[in-house]
Image (cartoon, grey):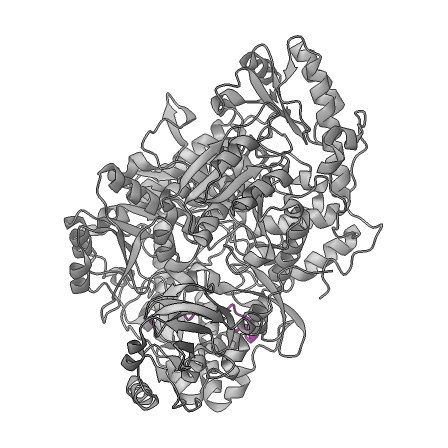
Amino acid sequence: MELIFEISKSGRGTADIPASDVPAVNIENTIGSKYLRNELDLPEVAEIDLIRHYTNLSRRNFGVDLGFYPLGSCTMKYNPKINENAAQLPGFTGLHPYIDDKSAQGNLQLIYEMQKYLCSILGMAEFTLQPAAGAHGELTGVMMIKKYFEKKKQKRRIILIPDAAHGTNPASSALCGFEVMELRSNSEGGVDIEHLQSLMTEDVAALMLTNPNTLGLFERNIEKVAAIVHGKGGLLYGDGANANAFLGKARPGDLGFDVIQLNLHKTFSTPHGGGGPGSGPVGVGEALVDFLPVPRVVKKDDKYKWSEKFPDTIGRVRSFYGNFNVVVKAYTYIRSLGAEGLRHATEMAVLNANYIKERLKPYFDLPYDRICMHECVFSGSRQVAESGVHTTDIAKKLIDYGYHPPTIYFPLIVPEAIMIEPTETESKETLDTFCEAMIAIAKEAKENPEGVKNAPVTTPVSRLDEVLAARKPDVCCKR
Amino acid sequence: MSKPNPQDRVYSRDHEWAKDNGDGIVVVGITDYAQEMLTDIVFVELPPIGKKVAKGEPVAVVESVKSVSDVYSPVSGEVIDVNTKLETNPEIVNQDAFGDGWMVKIRLSDAGELKTLLSAADYEQMLKEEKH
Amino acid sequence: MDYCPHTPDDIKQMQAAIGIAGIEELFADIPEKFMIKQIPDIPQALSEMETMSVMSELAGKNKLPRFTLTGAGAYYHFIPAVVGHIVGRAEFYTAYTPYQAEISQGILQAIYEYQTMIAHLTGTEIANASMYDGASAMAEAAVLCAKMSGKNKIIIARSVHPEYRQVVKTYSWANGYKVVEIPYIPSGQIDLDVLQKKLDDQVAAVLVQSPNFFGVVEDIASIADAAHKKEALFVTGFTDGTSLGILNPAGSLGADFVVGEGQSFGNPLNYGGPYLGIFAAKEKFMRRIPGRLVGATVDKNGKRGFVLTLQTREQHIRREKATSNICSNEALCALAAGVYLAALGKNLKRLAELNIYKTQYLKNSLLELAGWEEVFPTPVYNEFVLRCPDAQKVNKKLKKEGIIGGYALQKDYPELKNTLLFCATEMISKEDIDKVVAILK
């Protein structure tokens, strides 16, 4: 497809600018010619061409509304349309962030109540909605841990992270000056307790744990894990990326987590927008409340206002109050579902994942064969050994069947990993046809491996040369 | 199959080679086996000339599309030259890891260190064991 | 209302296939003592109709102003209709990050075009796919400079947005860097003499904004010289993105990084978010910058296509050695910005001119009021600072008429008593401005 610059033609345009109703001023005199730019090279396209360009681009993109999207760890559930409508209400979209609190009571109430709901759902003492995404929430959480130990005048330099963890965990820790030590998984895919005991010293600030972990497995020894960490004065950080597995069943606060971040664009159904915006609220137990970012909403006599009067705060991690409009969508979702709906969603998410696991077990290696939570992780090792077909090939072949592939090559501890997260909003029929496609691909891999290795053939482009893209990077069109 | 490991140099357990020029200067690169494991190399980050490195410390970084690996200096000393051709043509490492794909030249601070490294035969033995 | 399509019969069949008698068996790994029956304190489920009425009621508790004279980091601009229609296409907004390039060419190409437009607008050579917002983009640039140079001091102008400075401080504290603030001179610009004195060999980066928080245009070329002489990297922000339509961009004047808030490009005010962190840089930093990058390449048949590239910079590969932990960004806001900029095209310059006309008219009209005076006699884009007899009273009077007044600077700059930071975009009419003056007379 042509680039927008390639369909540009001098003299065309879409948006017109109204005539000025105030006197024009001489720009060179007003600003000074040395401060003015000489050229402005933006596309010039007629409105119809602009609409066709972007509409055609959209047709080369795959979203949840087009089909099944079992991207593990990303919780690509249906994004309810009512959420979008609610978020588009002018009262929510139209306010300037610096409008006086009295004029923004609706927004403030929504933020306040959302924090309370998240506290109830996760069993935490307080929440902040300021972080703009899950990784941003992680960073905020680790910053609070750092501040907590600063306040206690304890120098702790290590954070423990399991080998199966998301890459954001070690990166967030390093950004706060912590040293990362890797914690081994045991043969069941859980925390290796003995290893934890040997690593957990008074030099360790925290253990960052994803529960259920990235294998989709719940940490059976969670009570013991929490006791070991707390026993040495450390804190337990929860990566809430997998929260869709336990809503209404168990609460991280009760399990011993001191801080947890959520991803509203995963668990709470807000759309991910092709990469963002997300929203990464962080919940804390009593020990960390004082360190939350500012400003925080406070309620007094049924009136809400922003307050910065929290002397031990880590400060700000973002301008204004976070991705407010994303929060509106998640709030709408919680109000629609209620407590019972959230619990039911979790149950169906876990049911769907186990159903897929059982159906595909005969055809693909399953490194950890036990009841899983919201996702299951297979390995394509058998296919590699049998016919040289790799997990990438299986993923690309799924595209030809009309599906978005699962997450692949993650977690790192499973070779040729295929991580499938169906979510609760998919029907049995969808899961069945997906499983049949996977089974057909397993069969084709044996009988006609080239047919799998050449996929996809139904897309606007075939497999792209990533090596070329990285060796000779072209990230901006040079015209 | 990797190319044979030349006899005229020594090897580290981390898959680097070091070739002694006889004048106190060694040329350092990664083995053919290493480039094969890394797959298509897309970028090589080289150290500044004059950098002092200790044996076992990272001296360069090689990147493929999906991975990034440190190249550990097999010897201690000072970097006196780097292979700038790799900055624009990293694929040379894939094509000729033992020759044109060299990475840095180091002036040895302790010639004795060379003796602690593996011979081609020992390195091949190590590879065999690793595969098991 | 929930969105699960399972019938009781489906559930029964699926349980049988798994080999369980009831759903609770799936949760057997959770220790019994931690199981809860019900989430406490959540209001009961609502039908779609009821949900909408609850949400409308909440939205209705907000008072939308007639118009606003505050910018201060968030700008009220007209959004062409095409933007909403494109951003509202579910193929874009219900997609995840484009990990599978073959079925994500739409967003990948759109982001590539966005990167190109931003690099050009900022006068740099490259731009990434977006950061969270202007403040975090600036903070990440500061951290990157320190990590690249091995130095630990960050210099920031006091005329940078107060919240941006706070975010830079938070990130710097976490990394163990020191932040030094440089005062402004009576022109409202950075004090170059103090800057030069504070520039020692431990300074990793100098951070300014132009236009700065006071609306004042900084002399970027001189600051760049000062920074580079001491081998510090130079990061420049901006306030309203539309200023790039007319002002000489910092990238052309020596900035190593140009970062800022892109909300002005087609994104609503949204009470502060989601916004768009713009991050642009000189090409030599391409392999170090944070965030996602889309690159052009070819497919097996030689056809042009786009992929996420240079991913080894990122956390999922480099883990604790990554220079940033960013993963999700603001792709949809970047898409909106791309559509907005393509819709405006060269008219972005005329829009910027219109902003200047309105701003000058507002400023001159207010200056006719008794006791009002200009604080910084320096060129501005669409914001300016005035001193008035009683700033609080001014905003109160305007609020009574449904108008948001100026941003009171005293909170962040105690020395600027009774000063207000005003903003006029194309959305303010002459009639509005005349009304403001009439109210304040």
Quadrant, the N terminus of chain A:
bottom right
Residue at 58% of width from left, 18% of height from top? C399
Q: Is residue A447 above or below residue A264?
A: below
Q: Is residue B64 above or below residue A351?
A: below
Q: x, y (%) of residue C355? A: 72, 32
Image position of A311 (left or right of C278): left
In magenta stretch: residue A410:
yes
Q: x, y (%) of residue C92? A: 59, 56
Q: Is residue C65 above or below residue A57?
A: above
Quarter location, residue C408: top right
Image position of C5 (left or right of C193): left
Q: x, y (%) of residue C156? A: 50, 37
Looking at the image, which is closer to me, C138 or C48?
C138
| Magenta highlight: main SS | loop
Quadrant, the C terminus of chain A:
bottom right
Q: x, y (%) of residue A385? A: 39, 87
Image position of C130 (left or right of A416): right
The boundaries of the magenta stretch are A398-413
Image position of C421 (left or right of B25): right
In magenta stretch: residue C103:
no
Q: Tell which residue pokes out farthest to the front in this image.
A: B23
Quarter location, residue C125: bottom right
Residue A129 can be seen, yes or no: yes
